[in-house]
Amino acid sequence: MTPLRVGLAGLGTVGGSVVRLLLDNAALFERRAGRRLDLVRVASRTPKPDIDIGSATFDTALASLDADDVDVVVELIGGVSAAKDLVATAIGAGRHVVTANKALLAEYGEEIFESANRRGVSVGFEASVAGGIPIVNALRTGLAGNRIDAIAGIVNGTSNYILTAMQEDGRDFATALAEAQRLGYAEADPTFDVEGIDAAQKLAILAALAFDATIDIGGVHVEGVSGIDIEDIRYARELGFSIKHLGLARLHDDGIEVRVHPALVPESVLISKVSGVMNAVMAHGNAVGPTLYVGPGAGGMPTASAVVADLVELARGTLPVPRPAARRLPSLGIEDVDCAHYLKIPAIDQPGVFAEVADVLSRHEVSIEAVIQRPQAIRSGAEPWVPIIIVTDDVPEAVVRECVSELANLAGVTGEISRIRVADLSAMMPPT
């Protein structure tokens, strides 16, 4: 069969790794795909003479990939504007596209897929979510016999590394972040990672695929990990939880619940053991039940592995032409979510304060699942105070917000109340 002729845009960490895989494993890929994967053109705005691109033609202009000898354009330049133009040009010319660009797909995925459908070309995006974990293929093919009703997971390695360092090494947030930056796990400006934006984009892509629906990225509730204190980590562990930065999407009769935030995860659930920069994605199908996929969520070679997997599928003729989503689902507000909550209440160390706290919760019909309050935790200051740690039973978001507001106004409460949701993943995951 004729080779699949590949045009590659971008020679960064991932692009360079894709080139290396295509050259080093050429015979293996030919056997698996039934035809050769030939790298014919490479475009990078910055020349990389130290990267061997074989017999491919190099150019600094992305427009050089708009050529008759290119069957598929692999977009690895990142960003949105230039990447969107490159992808649109390729699709308009009848070329297939493979991309690792989560931001592009989260914002313009519907437009890109509709355009590709009209032109009858494929779009591969395995590398856009969870690095080397083949979660896109799992949802599209391995779980095709299921109705997927929930997705949850750790999809940002930077945040997971920071929380792991805080829990296992006792580091505070700033120290753990600095270490992540030193090791190359976090950017100099880590905002997209630590404030949850990256995870929200990935979750929107997964939810759209799992539920065959158009997901509005603006409807995803997003919170990051920058507000997590080392003390929260310690108390959570004492209560039998790990704190993880989770993305959760659930299908409801009247819409879709899509949220990204820190959460207490019971240590009896497998995902609580996923540490460091690893990612994990859970999917619950009506036939198979809970499934879990774990692996490296970023890095040159893991992401390149996902890119080449799409190219092999394309060469086989099994990478599908995207179809328009079956429906557009409204995003349910976070106010509609019912879950348990962890509360850390700074209370003046005097008789009657806990009774006042309990009275507020009782009047709002909020049940208490667990409490920690120890005399040795007393802090110094104008008045001695002690943190009261409470884990509630399931309660609507709007109700717990009212409770926290009322608790903050009590005379016996001093300082800001910390609140972290508890993730009930028992329906999705077997125990460890």
Image (tube, rainbow, N blue to C red):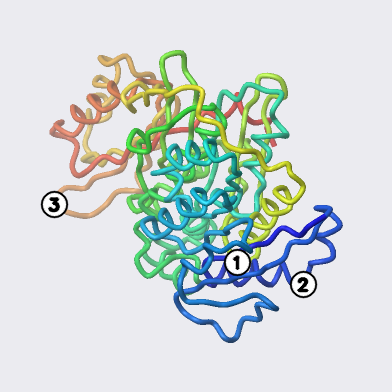
Q: Position of residue 417 (x, y in %)?
A: 26, 39
Which residue does the numbered mark 1 point to in the structure image? 300
Q: Position of residue 161 (x, y in %)?
A: 51, 58
Q: Are marks 2 and 1 in contact (CB under 8 Å)?
A: no
**Relative to 195, is 14 above or below?**
below
Q: Nearer the viewer, residue 215 or 39?
A: 39
The residue to which callout 3 is attached is 382
Q: Residues within 10 Å of mark 1 (few under 14, many from 20)?
A: some
Nearest to the eye among marks 2 and 1: give it: 2
Around disc 2, counting alpha carbons within 10 Å, would you say few (fewer than 14), some (14 to 19), or many (20 or more)? Answer: few
Q: Which mark is residue 168?
A: none
The residue at the far right in this view is 31
Tell me which corner region of the image, top left, top right, bottom left or bottom right, holds residue 347: top left
Is tag 2's residue or tag 3's residue first in the polypeptide sequence?
Answer: 2
| Percent position of residue 318, x then y | 73, 41
Mark seen at residue 24: 2
